[in-house]
Amino acid sequence: MSFNMFVQHLFNAITLGSLYGLVAIGYTMVYGILRLINFAHGDIFMLGAYFMFFGTVTFNLPWGIAAVIAVAASSVCGVFVDRIAFRPLRDAPRISALISAIGVSFLIENLSLVLFTGLPRQVIQPEWMVKIITIGEIRILPLAIVVPVIAFTLVLGLLWIVYRTKPGLAMRAISKDIETTRLMGVSVDKIIALAFGLGSALAAASGIMWALRYPQIHPFMGVFPGFKAFIAAVFGGIGSIQGAMIGGMLLGLIEIMIIAFFPSLSGYRDAFAFILLIVILLMKPTGLMGEKLEDKI
Amino acid sequence: MLKIDSLHVYYGGIHAVKGITIEIPRGKIVTLIGANGAGKSSTIRAIAGLVKHVQGHIAFTGRDGKETELTGKTPETMVKLGIAMSPEGRRILPHLTVEENLRLGAYIRTDEDGIVSDIDMVYSLFPRLRERSWQRGGTLSGGEQQMLAVGRALMSRPDLIMLDEPSLGLAPLLVKEVFDIIRQINSEGKTVLLVEQNAFAALKVADYAYILEVGNVVLEGTGEQLLSDSRVKAAYLGG
């Protein structure tokens, strides 16, 4: 493989990796606080893409405005999911919330199938994003630069909220000790809702950029990216935001590079992530940056 | 300032507190003493709003003279009314720095200047915390964690501070230090509700004390009275 080809693959890997990473952060945040794997998270990713589609195609909005609205709307959906599916189960055994998560996931997917139909839709890509630019011998899509830049900006913004603001302090506190945090006068349900809102916003941003990069969208488009982002979160160490982003990046890199170097394996593309999951769970279940887990689902 | 009237607390089928009546006058140190399972912690947790199944009345009178019923309210309401609690086992957040732990204690406040000056106030009360302000809570010793827990409770500027077993697991010298601090906090105008197993030390600082056994108040009186009571001596003060 030529160096130029390698660089192109690298750009693809970083794009895919940042998209996985953004979704992985939502899994990790919710898990860090509630010790719950929110299986409906991948569906928020899908909703983000659909809201973008409706914004740009149905309402003819400029893509930037449509994207902001889509992110906000998906964020509200994420908070709503917590409110109806998880909050009533806060004191219930954790397995109940897990089952609820699976139920919500099926509900969103099938409701979308009814409302949006199963026809794959085409998202409009802004022309400048997909006009290949050539640097020397290297040909890349502007999207492959835009996506990682937006992704990293969003992650930095999230880290700022988590480490530099008062709600962020409360969020870090409840991830260790909900009762004590409550004793300090923190309204825990509001902070949990905020975590769902932020996680869903990032998932939606990822879904929107995914739809720009791979323009076909359908109601089940969130399933596989959702699984893979979950794997990325476990890989990076579930509970760690930085870990989720690193896990996403590495998973993107592994997927793209294995196919690049061994094109004959491309049929097994989706299998790599799951093999990786099994290997991590066997070798280092706490992931790259994870803390000690007391008990897992 | 706080009147508890025939309070019952149930914990998953266990009747932990069986109709106790307690009064905490403003500016005083009141202590609840008793063995494990006597219902001390359940009482304090009921005041804080941490337990669900509570019957009876908990009436809090704030500085403005307004009376609020606390049963069925959340911890958030409690803190906003001017009550703070340092829970049993200190429960310092181990991954947050000392300063972040204190800031969490001031969560309901928005006066940044006041918070900064109160952090300074806590540091002058506990100089060792100032040296460790950037250290994670989990790296502190037991005594330092207890000081941080008390400091954190002070950060909401409470009128009433509830301390659940502040001397638990501390070396005798530190126990003395903790009780000195309790006295000092009280002399600065805060009402203190102290839950303790260390009956001798608690009775010595307390203005008034209640002795609990299996969910009932079996004896009450001023600290001095109880210290010289033969039944108390036999059961709690080692003869």
Image (tube, coloured by chain):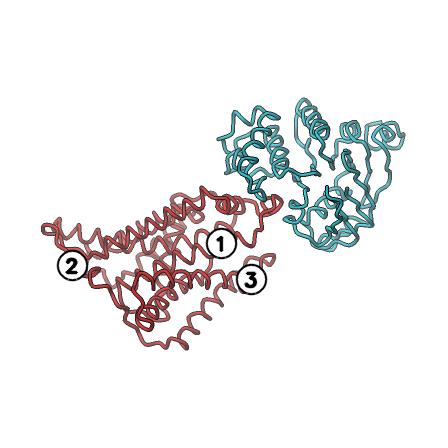
Choose top left, top right, bottom left or bottom right for residue A87: bottom right
Task: Choose the circle earlier in sequence order: 3 or 2.
Answer: 3
B141 and A258: which is toward the camera = B141
Q: CA distance from mark 3 to mark 1?
A: 22 Å
Residue A1 visible in the shown view: no
Provide the secondary structure element on which disc 1 rests: helix
Above-or-below relation of B233 to A31: above
The residue carrying pointer 2 sits among few (fewer than 14), some (14 to 19) or many (20 or more) residues within 10 Å by Cα, namely some
Above-or-below relation of B83 to B198: below
> Which residue bears the numbered disc 3?
A96
> Which residue bears the numbered disc 2?
A132
Residue B205 visible in the shown view: yes
Residue at x 38% of width, y 58% of height: A203
Task: Choose the circle earlier in sequence order: 3 or 1.
Answer: 3
Do callouts 1 and 2 point to residues on the same chain? yes
Give chain A's shade.
red
Choose top left, top right, bottom left or bottom right for residue A275: bottom left
Give chain B's shade.
cyan
Q: CA distance from mark 1 to mark 2?
A: 39 Å
